[in-house]
DNA sequence: TATGAATGAGGATTCATTCAT
DNA sequence: TATGAATGAATCCTCATTCAT
């Protein structure tokens, strides 16, 4: 690995493999901010610190870059959650809370949260991308939540519900929180506080799942 | 085949006053389907049955048309709901149900439901439109729901909640249902059934609001 | 002429023959101000107080209107001068002065003075119009001035000059005065005073025409 | 016929720095010939040997190109004259002659002479450009001529005149000569001969400036 | 690899002209 | 005659994509 370097001391030794990631990061910012069509590749290149031509060394075209942005920011989202579900040993209510708070920290509060807005906006124009996202993210997220519900119900912790539909309903507020921050957040007089939004969300979801006799227990633990 | 008339139709048989609505309807379809940027005014004109130039008799430019589409399809949505809240005399749970089912029939199931997706996608590019929508639709919808919560709580029907945040949370699944039908619906193996989605939604919301001792009452009435 | 009027008392009984003139007057204003291409027929119609369609009752198209504007404002320009030359009995220097001052009053100071600018700008695009103007205005003006020079020279009042070229030279400042008022006048800190400009002009021209021995005579009479 | 190469010429063989000048030259031709509005950028591009899009690499829009055409062809005009006035040591009459003949050779007879026509035609539509031209060209030209007059008067060579207005008057025939060649020249039966026009001009101007006692001197030197 | 000048198809917009009323 | 809604060809301008260097 101590090979002879061709250019003595490039100012910041940037591994060439970093380029695509830098471009994707720049593109994510701009796509999220402006949408697919309104984002100019000039701007992406400028923000990534490369020339326009360089984009085409790594991506076939704008659509390809768009898909790379989406695909490249999709995998990390679920893996943490699925692992957690797999090995969690506490109550299902606690699992739900950890999942939600973990999602917020790892994804919801980051710029990756801009992806759903993008997908929603462009699903009509890129059906294969929508399909990909539906299969790889939405379905997996729904399944995961479905498994959590089953875990709680089986343990007698949650009441019986129409799980297939409830998972859609219950995920919606999380998606909307992510979307909100990239659409209306800037219009608000007093900004929405994500933590309290999530508190209210968990309060609602867990209350609605609790069995009548389980109601004296406190469900929501405020984030310390 | 009747006669060799070149132009059997009069060049403009329709009335001037009908035109803007027809154009807005056509534009709504296409904007919802493709997004703002990907919609060509040629197509809007063709779908409205007019020529390209005619659009400019009624709208200054594409952006103006876009705003007209939003503004023109947004206000009627809330009025029905606000009236209902005003004059409703039954239980607050019933009120919630009627509001939600009414929204679905009047808006959620129509093409107007495509508007939220549009706004979400273009909020960054049209901040004033986003502000307008935030002020005229979102704020009013949140207020309305907040009033319903207060009504239920004051009557001892609902338990005490963090209303300011819960309204955001509780509206999210409705918005997402509207958005869903214009984004991922076409990717699904088995289509999401809106009625059962709404059942699950109402079940969740009303369960979570009910006071412990009120639990023997049945909350959700399946749509017959 | 006391015929049964269809509409009792049209507010201002406008003879229908007045229409073309009103349109031409409106068009003159706008063509002079903005040039041919930048003048919209909407604006012409609006200024003339008629609808756009009405323009086409009187003029075949925009070019035709343009030509009518030019042709309609061309004849009055020269007739007064030619008559004056014909019947003048005073000195040729006085004739020059009267011609110039008469031109200024009848034409140079009116909006008709905008025509030369128009013609100059559009000569390349409307060669037949340029030819018409050249034949009907420029040639006649040059001839007239040539005749005045001959009159003065024959009478021993003016020295011999290259009349064919001098007439071009000598008319230039008058044309430029007309053009100036429609181009740079608005840029000036202190506006050009036409009367003093014409004084300087007459002083120059008559001085240059005077014979050496005639120099003790005063040539220029300030306008009282 | 040499070989079936599709594109024998490299797509862009020329240097970046040469482009703006080439475009400006092409645009000057067309603007002068047709005016601002009637010139299509397609044609400018074609004449410059570039594509439409290339224009926008160097100029923001059509107006910007127009201004560049004017500004780029305007300043060099005056510098030569101002230098000459500064260092001239002969008679002021000779200075006038050299200035005029120099102007003719360097500017009046070139395509740059089309600029005044352009400015005149478009002053109303581009007030800032008119202002620029007024300040940078007209004012400087007037000042220069005013200085020459003062030089002649101070030396006792010229008679006293109303210099402020005479300069306007005296420059007019030169401007008109430039304009003429781009408007009516093509209408003439026998073309105006610029040299003889300038002879007549100088004869007139210098005659009109000469003091009575200075008249035995010959003023005008025919161009050999 | 990396660049960025050049391209040109595509789309928004304008406005002279038409024609049913 | 007079209107003005409708038309659509014409043109400016954008920006994804290419390719010689």
Image (cartoon, coloured by chain):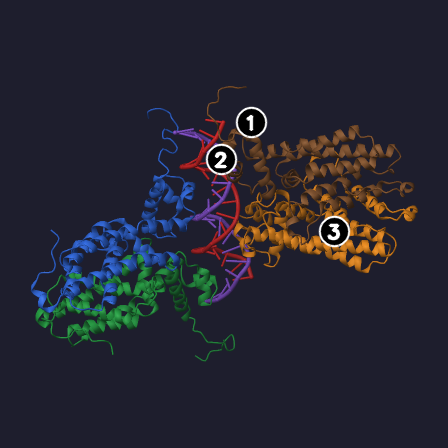
Chain colours: A brown, B orange, C green, D blue, E red, F purple
Tell me the CA gap for discs 2 and 1: 18 Å
Q: Quadrant of the C terminus of chain C?
A: bottom left
Q: Residue B148, how many percent across, how many down? A: 80, 55
Check disc 2 and report the residue beneath it.
A52
Do circles 2 and 1 both sit on a common chain?
yes
Q: Residue A146, how many percent across, how many down? A: 79, 34
Q: Earlier in the sequence, mark 2 or mark 1?
A: 1
Q: Residue D98, how many percent across, how many down? A: 17, 54
Give the number of the mark in front: 3 or 1.
1
Element type at marker 1? loop
Residue B128 versus residue C94: which sits nearer the camera? B128
The answer to which image quadrant residue E7 occupies is: top left
Check disc 3 and report the residue beneath it.
B106
- Residue B24 visible in the current orientation: yes
Mark 2 Cα shell of 10 Å, populated few (<14), some (14-19), many (≥20): some
* As drawn, A4 above or below C174: above
Tell me the CA gap for discs 2 and 3: 48 Å
Mark 1 Cα shell of 10 Å, populated few (<14), some (14-19), many (≥20): few
* As drawn, B40 above or below C116: above
Residue C48 versus residue A111: which sits nearer the camera? A111
Instruction: Kindly identify which chain the residue marked by label 2 belongs to.
Output: A
Which residue shows up at 55% across the image and 48% down it? B3
Seen in the image, is A56 located left or right of residue C125? right
Query: For the image shown, how many numbered marks are present on the structure?
Result: 3
Instruction: Kindly identify which chain the residue marked by label 1 belongs to.
Output: A
Give the number of the mark in front: 2 or 3.
2
Check disc 1 and report the residue beneath it.
A17
- Residue D190 visible in the current orientation: no
Element type at marker 2? helix
Q: Residue B177, how many percent across, how many down? A: 73, 43
């Amino acid at each position: 690995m101590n090979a002879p370097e061709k250019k003595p001391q490039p100012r910041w030794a940037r591994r060439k493999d970093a380029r695509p990631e830098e471009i994707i990061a720049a593109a994510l910012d701009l796509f999220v901010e402006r949408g697919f069509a309104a984002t100019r590749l000039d701007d992406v290149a400028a923000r990534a610190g490369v020339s326009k031509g360089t984009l085409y060394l790594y991506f076939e075209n704008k659509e390809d870059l768009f898909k790379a942005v989406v695909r490249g920011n999709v995998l990390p989202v679920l893996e943490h959650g699925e692992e957690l579900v797999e090995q969690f040993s506490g109550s299902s209510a606690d699992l739900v809370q950890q999942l939600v708070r973990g999602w917020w920290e790892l994804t919801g509060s980051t710029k990756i949260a801009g992806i759903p807005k993008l997908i929603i906006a462009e699903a009509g124009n890129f059906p294969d991308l929508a399909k990909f996202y539906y299969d790889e993210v939405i379905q997996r997220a729904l399944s995961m939540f479905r498994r959590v519900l089953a875990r709680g119900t089986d343990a007698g912790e949650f009441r019986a519900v129409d799980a297939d539909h409830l998972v859609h309903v219950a995920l919606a507020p999380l998606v909307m929180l992510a979307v909100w921050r990239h659409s209306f957040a800037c219009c608000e007089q007093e900004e929405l506080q994500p933590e309290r939004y999530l508190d209210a969300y968990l309060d609602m979801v867990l209350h609605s799942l609790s069995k009548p006799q389980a109601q004296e227990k406190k469900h929501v633990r405020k984030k310390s």
